[in-house]
Amino acid sequence: MKRRALAFAVGAAVVCLGFDDGGGKSLREAAQGAGLLIGAAVRSAQLSEAAYSSTLTREFNMVEPEDALKWEVVHPEAQRFDFSQADQIVDFAARHGMKVRGHTLVWHRQNPTWLAEGNYTSSELAAILENHIKTVVGHYRGKIFAWDVVNEAYDELHPGTLRSTIWRDQPGIGLAANGASYIERCFRWAHEADPQALLFYNEAEAEVVNPKSDAIYAMVRDFRQRGVPIDGVGLQMHIANLHADVASISANIQRFTALGVQVHITEMDVALPVDALGNPRPEDLQLQADIYRQIAGACLSHRLSYSGCTAIQTWGFTDKYSWIGSHSKQTQGAALPFDRSYRAKPAYLALRNTLAARSAIQ
Ligand code: 9MR
């Protein structure tokens, strides 16, 4: 859509919804004015869809492959890497002046069978992991500016402890299974492969101050004290039940940024109950918008020059393509700022106007 047409569409929505118009800016322009990166997780197969790619380039200045850099896609056989999907996304981003976050080098899910069922020894696994990290980070050296090096390493059921995984203790990569030493090793390998890349630890359900985020905080503080190369923490921000404890999220962002690391909101979506046709209630769209506005506000209030909370990213951007819609029995959905027809929702306006208000005072 051309900018004038967008302004008209957004303007019409503004009239309907009673929001101010954010100075007629796109989300991308508002984020740039606020000194923030605004990103979306993307799927390479959709880049050829005109509405998908035009909305993406108009509204975002950062992308992250949703699945294309996970082991099962990028390293499908022991001796073979396949960068074709992720390369498409990285090339697309370069053509449109967008930054790329990399997700993810070490996870317990979406690992290929050859790896998960390979019965490797610890030293074999360590060699496999080092080679994977150095090959993937090396392939995108200078092109991917930030990496989720390790994703979701802390346990859900036993808060504050590390999850049992192939990397930690099944059989592990040969380091003490207690403590975060295998994570440390991964950060050091990634740093060797691209010393300029920003290296993040990314986690779910650690957005508020809780035992999981306490454990991550202790790990990051220890890494910073000992010079382990960590630059940031990713707070995923998958919000269900229309509830977000914004005061606690804000306190959590504050304590991480006080350690000198950046915080990125990496996977935000706000799931709504939907009817059999997948449609949410109008009043829930307003509650959803309020959550997007509050989270953007929490990030902005900890935005410091070149540090602090520096990026907000949504997990997808249109309800047409969202993990929530595809994984549930359609009782939840409509979690993103654009609807299935790429129309801006109240959540879009809330995000855009919050960022535009910040850019107006800078
Ligand atoms: O959105 C991703 C979906 O397409 C995959 O099928 C799924 C596999 O587990 O992973 C989803 O993304 C996850 C992300 O990589 C890590 N945090 C949670 C995300 C939602 O499950």
Image (spheres, rainbow, N blue to C red):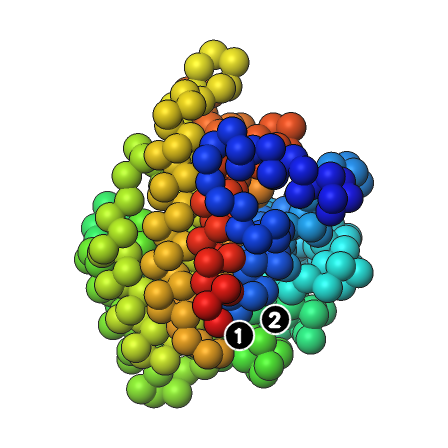
Q: Is residue 188 visible?
A: yes
> Number of callouts in the render?
2
Task: Name the image quarter holding the N terminus.
Answer: top right
Which residue is disc 1 drawn over?
198
Residue 177, picture quadrant: bottom left
358 with respect to 85 (left or right): left
Do tag 2 and tag 1 residues touch (Cβ < 8 Å)?
yes
Q: Nearer the viewer, residue 308 or 205?
A: 308
Q: Nearer the viewer, residue 127 or 312?
A: 312
In this picture, is 293 found above or below 306? Answer: above
Q: Position of residue 123 (x, y in %)?
A: 49, 70
Which residue is disc 2 drawn over?
145
Q: Position of residue 132 (x, y in %)?
A: 61, 65
State the residue at coordinates (51%, 29%). Answer: 16
Find the distance from the CA under tag 2 to the CA under tag 1: 6 Å
Q: Position of residue 304 (x, y in %)?
A: 41, 76
At label 2, which amino acid type do we have? Answer: Phe
In this picture, is 12 found above or below 297? Answer: above
In this picture, is 253 found above or below 304? Answer: above
Residue 260, picture quadrant: bottom left
Toward the top, the furthest residue is 276
State the residue at coordinates (74%, 44%). Answer: 4
Q: Secondary structure at mark 2?
A: loop
Q: Position of residue 211 (x, y in %)?
A: 19, 57
Task: Report crowding for label 1: few under 14, some 14 to 19, many 20 or more residues within 10 A (C-alpha).
Answer: many
Q: Is residue 171 visible?
A: no
At label 1, which amino acid type do we have? Answer: Leu
State the residue at coordinates (69%, 41%). Answer: 6
